[in-house]
Image (spheres, coloured by chain):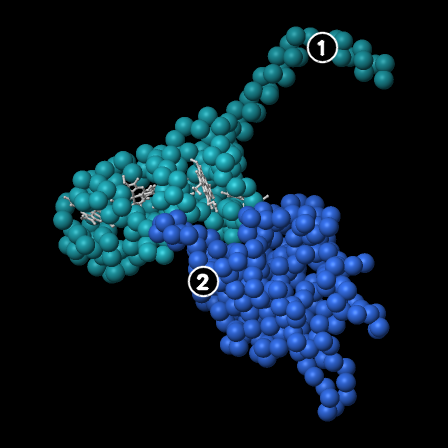
Amino acid sequence: MATHGKKQDNRSPADWWLFVLGFVLFAAVGFWATPAILYAEKPQPFQFSHKLHMEQVGEGCQSCHAFREDGSYTGIPSLEKCKECHGEEPMGETPEEKVFSKDYVAKNKPIPWQVYSKQPPCVFFSHAAHVANAGLECASCHGDHGDTEKLRTYEYNRLTGYSRDIWGWSLIPLDGPPKRMKMDDCAKCHRDNGVRDACFVCHK
Amino acid sequence: MSSSASEMRFGMVIDVDKCTGCGACSVACMSENNVGVLPDETDKIRSITWLRVYQIDNGQPYPNTQIAFFPRPCQHCAGSQGHHTPCVSVCPATATDRDPKTGIVSQIPTRCIGCRYCVAACPYHARYFNWYDVPWPEGMDKPLSPFVAPRMRGVVEKCTFCFHRYQRAQNKAFTSGEAMGEMDYQTACTEACPSGAITFGDLNNPEHKVHELKKSPYAFRLLERLHTDTAVYYVSAREWVRRQADNYLSGEKLAKVQAGGGH
């Protein structure tokens, strides 16, 4: 025991620097490697420009994302909606539209979009409560997605299969866009707004 | 006074004299709530039926034998006179709680650690443990309901009074601006019952049918002496049926227990 104490007394500043250097080095590697190991990319079927389409439609976001009569939300519109304007021949020149016309419209195949905000199966989310009742802006949860020209990369957690947006893109919560939407994030806004609190509000 | 009063109190009144024991409620419940079929469904200790139909008889020899059936969903106990919801109070993981707005006892399988305290605590055997992953046959996972999360091996599940139907009814109320009506939120078993034995609604709401039905002199609840204050009432005009709802001494009168919850 006594020798141990003695050794500690003998630590030189160089020892400490080595420790700090090692710590910083490994932390840096960890920060870089962890997301790379944990998350994998999945491509979107093709590019989609919200900006371009907002200039084409008459009723803004509601033209494509609306409530059904029973209060459920249509979410991403079905191919039927696209077919109101798009035929089997592309209107423009872009390769994106060719893929869309050839592989989906012509074959009448639903588009397998990757949904950035998709929550785990046990979560119940209601656009009716937030948009129709509380009058929240889309942007307060989805950021600027409605103004974008290009789809960003979709990544999912290799272990759970959930979208990376749920737990956020930044390990330290600097929380630039895209916004994360963990249980705590839902709950924080609910607390601030006095929404009732029980497991059977957001779960099913 | 109820120890955990809730704003609304969803519950059932089940007319035992109308129940024919056909099991349509059980089947409707299983398909509504993504309850799977296990390879060996004859193993009743391990199979899962959120709404099980029990059969009782009056113990008389033929030709005086009479039979009655008890459909048994989760009783959504509130707990009265200082008692509490048995399962909620023992859960070490907060995987189950009682919603103070609807009076519904939740179950969050993803949170469950599988200790099964709640299974042991429940006096009604309403909770079930998943001993196996459900082997959905090829293609049979396609008709699963997206409104109810499927469960995995190692967690407990139970009847939720089709809470997802409440969520959907609420969505409709939010968008239409009209208050949720009695018929907007009905459980799958209620709808499936061919003889109309099950009535579902808010026990606290005088406009709902259950509010009146539960006041019948023939209404009773299971094991009332435990003070679980359940949300499921049964009705039977037959005294021998009512007698089997609790543990009575041979000479004991029924009325005493039901009127005052006496000890």
Mark 1 or mark 2, which is nearer to you?
Answer: 2
Q: Is residue B175 above or below residue B12?
A: above
Which residue is identified by label 1? A11
Element on which disc 1 rests = loop
Return the x and y of residue B107 as percentages of the image width and height.
60, 53
Report whether A94 appears left or right of B76: left
Q: Which mark is residue B235?
A: none
For mark 1, name the chain.
A
Q: In the picture, which chain is blue?
A: B
Q: In the image, what residue occupies the spot 47% across and 34% down?
A: A193
Q: In the image, what residue occupies the spot 45% across and 62% down?
A: B183
Q: Is residue B219 above or below residue B165?
A: below
Type of the residue with mark 2: Met
Type of the residue with mark 1: Arg
Q: Which mark is residue B183?
A: 2
Colour displayed for chain A in the image of the structure = cyan
Return the x and y of residue A59 as percentages of the image width and height.
21, 44
Return the x and y of residue B196 as percentages of the image width and height.
52, 74
